[in-house]
Amino acid sequence: MDQLEELIASTFAAFKAEAMSTPPMSLRAGDAVDDYTDQPSYSAQADAITDDYLREFRWGLPHLDSASWRHYLPHLLAHAAKHHALGSDVTDALIQNLRPPDRGQLSSLSADQQQVVIKVLDLIAFCETSPHSQAAQTALEEWWAPGALYRPASI
C-alpha cells in the first residue's frame, strides 16, 4: 500500500462510525438549502457518495449540521487527497469549510480525526502543482497547525 492509499485508509478508519451512519441532512439537501429550494429526503440511492455526487452537491457543505458534516468529511478528504496535485472544486469547497469561523464542526472532531485532516491539508499545502496549496496553508495557519491564529487553546 502506498502513502496515498494509507492516508485514505486512515481517514476512513478515523471516521468509521460517522461514515457508516445515515446523516441527518444529506449533502444534496444542503445544496437545496443553498439554492433556496425544498430539501429532499435522504435516499440511499440518490445520495450514494461518488466523486460526481461530491462535485454536484458541494455547495451544500456549509449548510450541514455537525453530524452530517462528519459523515461526509472522510469522503471529501479522500477526494481531496486523490486529486491533490490537480485540485478540484470539491477540494476548494472542503478547504474553505475547514477554515474559521468554527460553527461547532471543527471543534467536534476527535484527536484522530483532526490528525487526518491535518495530513490531508499538509499533502495539499506542500504540493508544488496543487492549485489549492495556498488555501490549504492558510487553513493550517488559521486552525490546524500548532499555535494556529484562531483556534481556541482549549481545543
Image: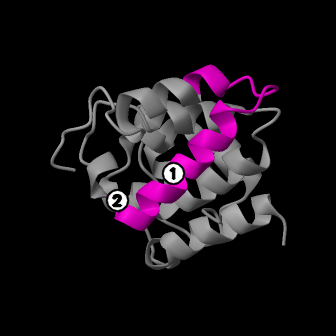
Q: Which residue is mark 2?
A: 109
Other residues around mark 2 within 10 Å, as few (<14) / some (14–19) / many (≥20): some
Q: Is there any visible trace of residue 139 in the rendered image?
A: yes
SS at badge 1: helix
Tell me which amino acid carries mark 2: Leu
Q: Is there any visible trace of residue 24 in the rendered image?
A: no
SS at badge 2: loop
Q: Tell me which secondary structure the magenta stretch mostly adopts.
A: helix
Residue 35: image x %, image y %?
47, 31
- Residue 136 position by quadrant: top right
Mark-to-mark CA distance, 1 and 2: 10 Å
Other residues around mark 1 within 10 Å, as few (<14) / some (14–19) / many (≥20): many
- Which residue is found at the position 64% from the left and 37% from the top? 91
Residue 44: image x %, image y %?
59, 73
Q: Which residues are magenta?
A: 109-135
Tell me which amino acid carries mark 1: Val
Answer with left or right where residue 6 lies relative to residue 103.
right
Answer yes or no: do the residues labelled 1 and 2 have beta carbons within 8 Å? yes
Image quadrant in which the N terminus is located = bottom right
Answer with left or right where residue 104 lies relative to residue 141.
left
- Which residue is found at the position 33% from the left and 47% from the top? 106
Q: Is residue 66 above or below residue 151?
A: below
- Which residue is found at the position 47% from the left and 57% from the top? 115
Q: Is residue 116 above or below residue 52?
A: below
Q: Which residue is mark 1?
A: 117
Q: How many marks?
A: 2
Q: Nearer the viewer, residue 55 or 75?
A: 75
- Which residue is found at the position 55% from the left and 69% from the top? 43
Colour pattern of the rendering: one colour
Residue 137: image x %, image y %?
54, 27
